[in-house]
Amino acid sequence: MVKRRVPVPLVDPFARRVKDLRISITDRCNFRCSYCMPEEGMQWLARSDLLSYEELARVARVCVEEYGFDAIRLTGGEPLVRAHVVRLVELLAPLGVDVAMTTNGVKLPEVAHDLARAGLTRVNISLDSLRRETFFALTRRDELDRVLAGIDAALDAGLVPVKINAVVMRGINDDEVVDLAAFGRDRGVGMRFIEFMPLDADDAWSHDKVVPAREILDRIHAVFPLREAPVAGSGHTQPAERFEYADGRGDVGVIASVTEPFCGNCDRVRITAEGKFRTCLFAIDEFDLRAVLRAGAGLEADDLDERLAAEIARAVGTKWAGHRIGQADFVRPDRSMSQIGG
Ligand code: SAM
Ligand code: SF4
């Protein structure tokens, strides 16, 4: 196939340019966060169902070269439980775009430096509580200390800016919002508070468990005054609405997916660990890129890039205006967050 010299922007039916690819590399995880996975009984994908690193890298290359995607994020499940993940970063780094990762951080003390050397640019680390009991209640694992060590390892490895994701749940950790903000200020990491979304495997989500982003900001502002941050210069739509501390000690963001959805500016698409292409976290329709990748001569097929590009464009042509959480016609996807890739 003759390569296009200049990527053609991929635009969805609502005139949004799509340029951010989230890649789930595994459905497995070493945590069992209550807002994501069931305590037990999860059915795992077979090894042969997962896209290989070469297959994932091929999809990423088509997105970058054909459509000018400029950001890739590795996620899961827990991306660091898949073997040899450094190798995947090595395959993606030559694409020359931002390659980031979202992780629970437990394995970062072992691999942060190798990931940085391989070309990972930065990480988001999940940390919902600084209290051991609450951390355990949320993640069902007693690993707070290792996650804190993982944050230090990421900073030490230069995977910056390190951002910390905290899902806030009413009655569980909402009383820790200010403590987490103080932690972010002290450690020089940007806290990102996320509203609880209806993607938990236990199907226990309800509106009254969501702590609205405004309330989170008000609580922080009362202790550490905030001002609106200038728009970040990456050209990327940030789901997090960002604020700076008035005293100059860093920033904080809120991801108000439920109470103030940012769908109007969404530039993301996702691929699940088994190669299903999704145009929204809440999408019902999926497009089977694994079937495209494995048809005929597989990765050796001459027309593979063309076929992948066409299927991705077809999928993006179905991207909807936005999710319908809270609306009468909202339909929950039959996958949970760890099966989609957050
Ligand atoms: N295992 C990694 C981690 O936890 O960071 C990456 C995958 S996880 C699915 C990605 C992000 O989704 C995490 O920050 C997690 O807290 C968030 N998340 C999971 N379930 C969620 C839910 N129901 N609502 C909001 N955020 C959720
Ligand atoms: Fe695992 Fe991340 Fe889901 Fe927690 S949120 S269970 S760490 S995939």
Image: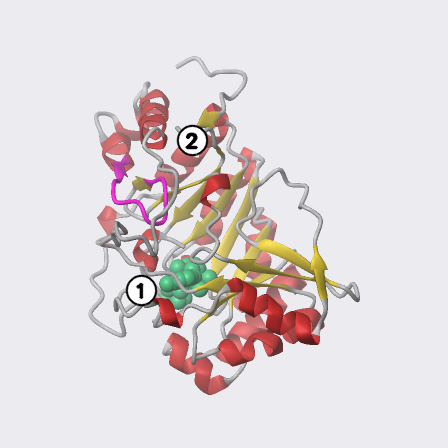
Tell me if 66 is positioned left or right of 27 in this view: right
Evaluate whether residue 30 shows in this view. Answer: no
Which badge, 2 or 1, comes first in the chain's sequence? Answer: 2
Q: Quadrant location of ligand 1?
A: bottom left
Residue type at mark 1 is Asp
Which residue appears at 37% of the width and 71% of the height?
208
Which residue appears at 53% of the width and 16% of the height?
5
Comparing 39 with 145, the one in front is 39
- Examine the rendered structure and indicate whether residue 118 appears above or below residue 70: below
Q: Is mark 1 within 8 Å of ligand 1?
A: yes
Q: Secondary structure at mark 2?
A: loop
Q: Secondary structure at mark 1?
A: loop
Where residue 131 appears, as percent x and y from the top left, is 52, 84
Per the rendered image, the range of residues in magenta is 278-288
Comparing 152 with 185, the one in front is 185
Tell me if 67 is positioned left or right of 302 in this view: right
Where residue 64 appears, as percent x and y from the top left, is 49, 30
Task: Place residue 280 in its image quadrant.
Answer: top left
User: Which quadrant would the C terminus be assigned to in this image?
Assistant: bottom left
Residue type at mark 2 is Phe
What residue does disc 2 label?
Answer: 14
What residue does disc 1 label?
Answer: 200
In this view, the residue farthest toward the bottom is 133
Give the Cα separation between the discs numbered 2 and 1: 28 Å
Q: Is residue 309 magenta?
A: no
